[in-house]
Each structure stands twice: as C-alpha cells, then as structure tokens.
Amino acid sequence: MKYKRILLKLSGEALMGKKGFGIDQERLMEYAKEIKSAYDAGCQVAIVVGGGNIFRGIQAEEGGMDRVHGDYMGMLATVINSMAIQSALEGLRVQTRLQSAIKMEQICEPFIRRKAVRHLEKGRVVIFGAGSGNPYFTTDSAAALRAIEIEADVILKGTRVDGIYTADPEKDPTATKYEKISFEEVYTKGLEVMDLTAFTLCKENNLPIIVFDMNKTGNLLSLLNGQKIGTLVEM
Ligand code: GTP
C-alpha cells in the first residue's frame, strides 16, 4: 500500500448524484463501498465532506444573508453529510467515529486530535464534521488542516474530473491532464486545485495532494495500490 493514512476530501455536491439537492442514496452507497475497499485493504482513512448539496454559504450571502451566519449553516450541512456517510459505512460493517469541530455531543464526538489518531490506529474510519469550525474557511481548508494534524500521508481530493488539466476540460476540449505537477507550477499557472488557503497549507507542510475521479469505481483502491490515477501535486 503506497499510502498508509489518507485524508479523503469528498464534495457535498457529489453526494447529490443525479438529484438537484440533498443526498442520493445510490451515490452515497457507491462512495461507502469505495471507502470500504480502502479500509479493507488496511488503509487508515479519515474523511472530510463538503456541504454544498444542502447549503451554500456564499450563495446565501449573495441573497443578502450575513456571511458568517451562512458559513455556520454550511458547517451544519457538512455534519448532515458526515452522518450520512457514517451511517452508510456502518451499514457495510465499517467501524467509524464522527468528530465535529462544533460541539454536538448528542450526535458525535467533539474534535480531539489525539483521539482521532487513536481511532485511526484502532482501525476506525474517522469523519470530521463541521469543517474547521470557523467561518471564512472552506471544507478544503478544513481537510488540509485535519490532514496535517493527523499526519496523513496524502490528501485525496475526490472530484468528478480525473485530475488537473491545463484548462477546464469541461469547457476546453484541447485541455490535457497533468500526471504530476509541483505546488509552484500550480501557483504560477494559476490552476484551480483548491482554494489558496487550503493549497498553501498543503504546500507549507509538504502534504501531497492527489486530485482524482471519485465517481469511477475502483479508483480509490487502485490509487492506494500505487497506480497512477489522477494528478499528484507535490514539492
Ligand atoms: P477507545 O477509547 O479508543 O476504545 O474509543 P471509543 O470511541 O470506543 O470509546 P468511547 O467510550 O470514547 O466511545 C464509545 C462510543 O461513544 C463511540 O461510538 C463514540 O463515537 C461515542 N462517543 C464518544 N464521545 C462522544 C460524545 O461526546 N458524543 C457522542 N454523541 N458520542 C460519543
């Protein structure tokens, strides 16, 4: 196994599947099976999920809502998604623990770094809910922060494209994919991998990022087995 401990970042929107809103049960189960395959292979898995399928703080702000208020609502949305992932995984008999950056002791543990690491060592998938617990930070930033805190070997950003391209492949048919790219090159070329806060956190802490297609069955496990899937960003 190439990576022993990973932080998997999932997008909230991806959980919508073909629906326009909320959680598509089919997509949720597909993701759970992918995660289980990594877990069964002995990988220590931590997960951060976005909340855009339920609530988007930025759009709410455009509609006149206070930014900070909207961001907190977005954090709560990530807890809903985290609970859905937890439930789906436990349905597959994967042991999990959910930790939230905002205390909700009736439904999950509070985020405690050392406990999270202990859970991983004991073979539990750890899901981090409520982002970083702070407004103005994205779930990508939360994912980068948690990955660094738990000393993950890599952050895996599951998306619907299979890597980083020279241009947006959904708009420009001549765009080509990078197999590997340095942090520096991502900066200078202005490529969109994560927001700059998240990206800088990874760069400054020498945490490699892999952007890959999470919707393709088997991709996650192949990647962990060392196959060249997606795009690797490293020093
Ligand atoms: P170990 O001490 O390593 O065995 O970890 P553990 O998670 O099994 O022990 P613990 O007794 O802390 O937790 C038992 C169960 O209670 C787990 O499902 C935890 O997720 C859950 N749990 C622990 N703390 C909290 C909390 O503050 N709130 C909620 N809702 N559940 C909690």
Image (tube, rainbow, N blue to C red):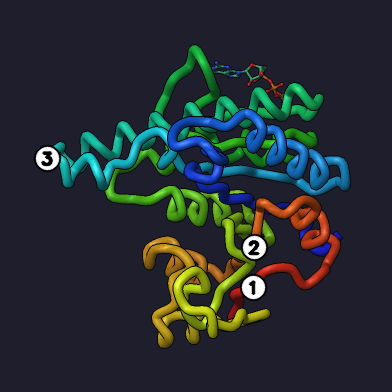
Q: Is residue 19 above or below residue 162?
A: above
Quick check: can you spot residue 101?
Answer: no
- Toward which corner of the image does residue 112 lie, by quadrant? top right
Cβ(mark 1) to ligand 1 < 8 Å?
no
Q: Is residue 169 above or below residue 106?
A: below
Q: CA distance from mark 1 to mark 2?
A: 7 Å
Q: Residue at x 57, y 53 (%)?
A: 147
Residue 71 point in image, percent of width and height: 29, 40
| Quadrant in which the C terminus appears | bottom right
Q: Amino acid at mark 3?
A: Gly
Q: Are marks 1 and 2 in contact (CB under 8 Å)?
A: yes
Which of the marked residues, 3 or 1, is nearer the chain's N terminus? 3
- Secondary structure under tag 2 reads strand
Which of the marked residues, 1 or 2, is nearer the chain's N terminus? 2
Q: CA distance from mark 3 to mark 1?
A: 38 Å
Q: Amino acid at mark 1?
A: Thr
- Crowding at dot 3, Cα within 10 Å, few <14 / some 14-19 / many 20+, comes out as few
Say which residue label 2 marks.
212
- Toward which corner of the image does residue 134 lie, by quadrant? top left
| Label number found at residue 124 | none
Q: Residue at x 40, y 33 (%)?
A: 54
Say which residue label 3 marks.
64
Q: State the residue in front, 194 or 154.
A: 194
| Label number found at residue 231 | 1
